[in-house]
Image (tube, rainbow, N blue to C red):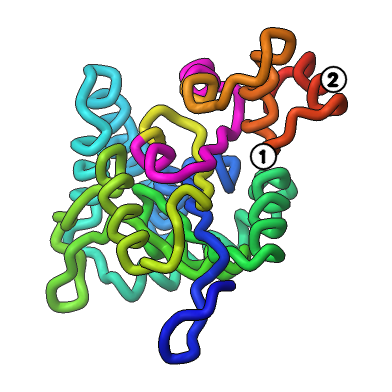
Amino acid sequence: MAVVAGGGRWPAYLVFCDVDETLIGCKSMFEFLRFQLVRRYGQEGEERYRCVAGELRRQSAEGAPREDVNRAYYRSYAGESAAEMAVLGREWFSLASVDPGFFIASTVAELERHQAAGAEVVLVSGSFAPCLDPVAERVGAQHVLCTSPLVAGGRYTGDVSEPVIGEGKRAAVLRMLAEYPGVNPRDCYAYGDHPSDFPMLDCVGHPRGVGDAPAVRAYLDRRAEPVDAAVSGCAVACWSMGRDEHSEACSQECALPLG
């Protein structure tokens, strides 16, 4: 850690990490929506979930921007108690996280490696605090940048201030970096699994891909420093696995599919 004025210390660097299908193997917003509705309303809750989820999928299939779909999701919470959702979020997490596949083990290992090197972890997601706070606590993340539903009188209004999706992720990450003038963005890392994470990955010197989405592989290929013709594809594979070096072992792993 770098020493700052007044005796405090900056972290060595920051690690920005998407959550759904990057750190955990599910889509937290949909999983929690279903959990809390069924938990409260039983079979009627299941029907409510199918109705809301179906409408959101329809909007997405028709080409609605992800930011608009994100806003539509939170409209379904209008009138709900924020405190009750926070309690249900922890209940959802305590049950869901028992599944061995809930966390993506390779990503957790990467975050632990960074933390051991003196980095601070920042979760960045279009999901919201009831889902994300217990995840952050489990992995030791110091910060959570997420979509924040507006609250009035202790209840969600159905509106949000800014969806932390796509360019919203870039804006949130840049605001966080501005709070750490002693940290060089070139030293920072970011992990994502989807093209909507590219604006976040653009903000750091070390982007990392999780999974095998072709668009993410292509993005990492563009961002990677070329090594030589023999290992030109290796940069993509190694970056996706969280490596910077281009060793013999790395060259052997390039023959394996990313995952």
Classify residue 175 as left or right of residue 235.
left
Q: Position of residue 196 (x, y in %)?
A: 36, 33
The spot of residue 51 in percent (x, y) is 29, 35
Which residue is under mark 2? 252
Nearest to the observer: residue 24 or residue 72:
24
Look at the numbered disc 1 and give the secondary structure of its residue.
loop
Judge from the rendering whether residue 152 lies leftward or rightward of residue 185; answer left or right.
left
Which amino acid, mark 1?
Gly
- Residue displayed at 60% across by 29% down: 211
Label 2 secondary element: helix
Stretch in magenta: 199-218
Relative vertical location of residue 118 with respect to residue 234 in this rendering, above or below: below
Categorize mark 1 by other alpha carbons within 10 Å: few (<14), some (14-19), many (20+).
some
Q: Quadrant of the C terminus?
A: top right
Mark toward the start of the polypeptide (1 vs 2): 1
Is residue 115 visible in the rendered image? The answer is yes
Q: 2 and 214: which one is in front?
A: 2
Q: Of the numbered discs in the image, which one, if any, rests on residue 242? A: 1
Q: Residue shown at 60%/22% (left/top)?
A: 212
Residue farthest to the top, as pictured = 229
Image quadrant in which the N terminus is located: bottom right
Q: Position of residue 169 (x, y in %)?
A: 32, 46
Q: State whether residue 216 is above or below residue 41.
A: above
- In the picture shown, does residue 143 fall above or below 243? below
